[in-house]
Image (cartoon, rainbow, N blue to C red):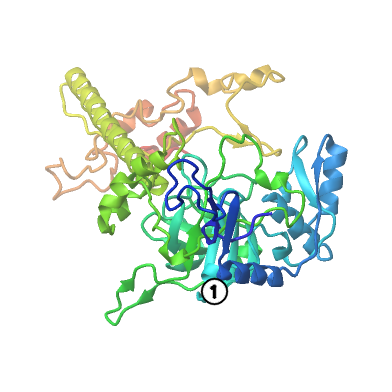
Amino acid sequence: MKFAINTKYLIIFLIAAVAVGGCGIEAGDNSTPLEDSVVVVINVDSVRNAKLIAENDVFPLINYQRVYIENYKKLKEIRSKYAYKSKNLSAHKAFTTLNRKELRYVRIKDTVIVPDSVIADMRAYSVFPPYYPGAADLPKIIVISNAYLSYACYEYGRIIRLAAVNSGKQRTPSYPGRYALVWKEKDRRSSLDSNWHMPYNWNFHAAAGSAFHKFSMPGRPASHSCIRQFMSDAKWLYYWGEGVKFDTNRKQIPMSGTPVLIIDNFDFSRKKYGPWLDLANNKDVWLDLPENPMQVEEALIPYSQIPEASRWGLRNKERYLYAEDTLRARGVIRPGVKLIATVNYNELRRKKALKLAEEEEAKRKLQAEEDKLNIDLIKDNLEKLDNKPVEVIENPGPAVPTTISTDPAGEIETNKPDESNPDKNNPDKNNPDKNNPDKNNPDKNNPDKNNPDKNNPDKNNPDKSNPDKSNPDKNNPDINNPDINNPDKNNNATEEKVKEKKAEGKEEVKPPSEENPPE
């Protein structure tokens, strides 16, 4: 079992006598040599701290069992036993915390650990010591272990909260060192990718954008340097932590929020799971914590991990420029691992949308120019054919069909032949006047139709002052031409009537016309 006791406080001295040329021991001296003597010096503070740790260890021993999910039946059993239900919340939280993953990520051929007893307080499953002597004077501090994917919250040295996390993946890791809470937002959309919804967001590095927040928990380091956690833990931390403080000029005081320590690194050479699966019980490992947490080096973060929009305001910019080399030298970044530079996906989408819009506008303009050229070409060709200007009507309305009807079924019919009635397709068969074009044109044999003065006998009559009232037809030379008023030569009845009225001289007989059609 590891305790949070620094070994420099437990010093063992071995002093051996020197036989040849011994300093301070002369030949024949009867004094007893210090050969094989051991002096043990124990620091009083170490003893006191060990006692405080033991006094705060209030939870019983809980043994763990590794379970291999070999088939769907076993998977269903695990999911049922630790399902999220109102009467099963403690068991669900204990299982997901121990395995650092949501239940939905548990699959066939996975290995999980299950406790032999369930306690509602997650501190019972902690890999952090129940008491942190170095933080005894600090009102609040958060300590994160990348190796064991969990964090502990302390108040004046006593642990008050244990939570599982999923930290940064190998190419975008959560770098060890000291941070502090800065600002928070209850319902946050990432400034790098608005698709990332991050409830109960607590930023602890303003430039890098590193933050605690709720997000999916697959059970491995998976984030872009952030600390993912379950919803209940994210909500609790949101209200517990304290952000940056301000001076009298309302300027931020750096590192003035609740301190945050990341104390180690995840072993990425391990292909699956993590060291929590190797634990035999809840007291198997207690992590060593820094003796003086506020003297821990401020985290080194490579310049490539800082979004471009945040680089202009960096404090101690040089630290960011040489950070990657230092981290590689310390083994924090493994050999051969290439870091992924921070990408602003929102900006990439904006640029892509702008480019597509510009391309569409260019296509539209090109099409408009081509259409104008085509119209001008057609116009020129028509003018050459007709030797006269052509008026071009732009955007004509839709053509209206001339013979479209709708049948009772609501379907549109066109002029298709009626095969059931052969005569229907021959409209001239029942029209005897079709072969007599003059029948339908009564004005064809009327030369006066186009002469409006023909029916005005007085206009060309020099004897207007002495009209012959007894002979109303004197000035009508066409009255003797019955064919002029008779478009149909076979209409004898009309001719006889004209002659009778002329002989009687009772009334003026006007020649047939459009105003006076034949009876």
Q: Which residue is mark 1?
A: 136
Q: Residues within 10 Å of mark 1 (few under 14, many from 20)?
A: some
Q: Position of residue 268 (x, y in %)?
A: 56, 38
Viewer can see residue 199: no
Return the residue found at the far left: 462
Q: Is residue 32 above or below residue 142?
A: above
Return the residue found at the far front: 28
Q: Is residue 418 left or right of residue 344?
A: right
Which residue occupies the foreground of this view, 364 or 493?
364
Q: Is residue 43 above or below residue 350?
A: below
Which residue occupies the foreground of this view, 246 or 17?
17
Which quadrant would the N terminus be assigned to in this image? bottom right
Look at 22% across and 23% down and name the residue there. 377
Viewer can see residue 291: yes
Which residue occupies the foreground of this view, 353 or 301?
301
**Residue type, numbered disc 1:** Ala
Q: Position of residue 70 (x, y in %)?
A: 83, 34
Which residue occupies the foreground of this view, 415 or 121?
121
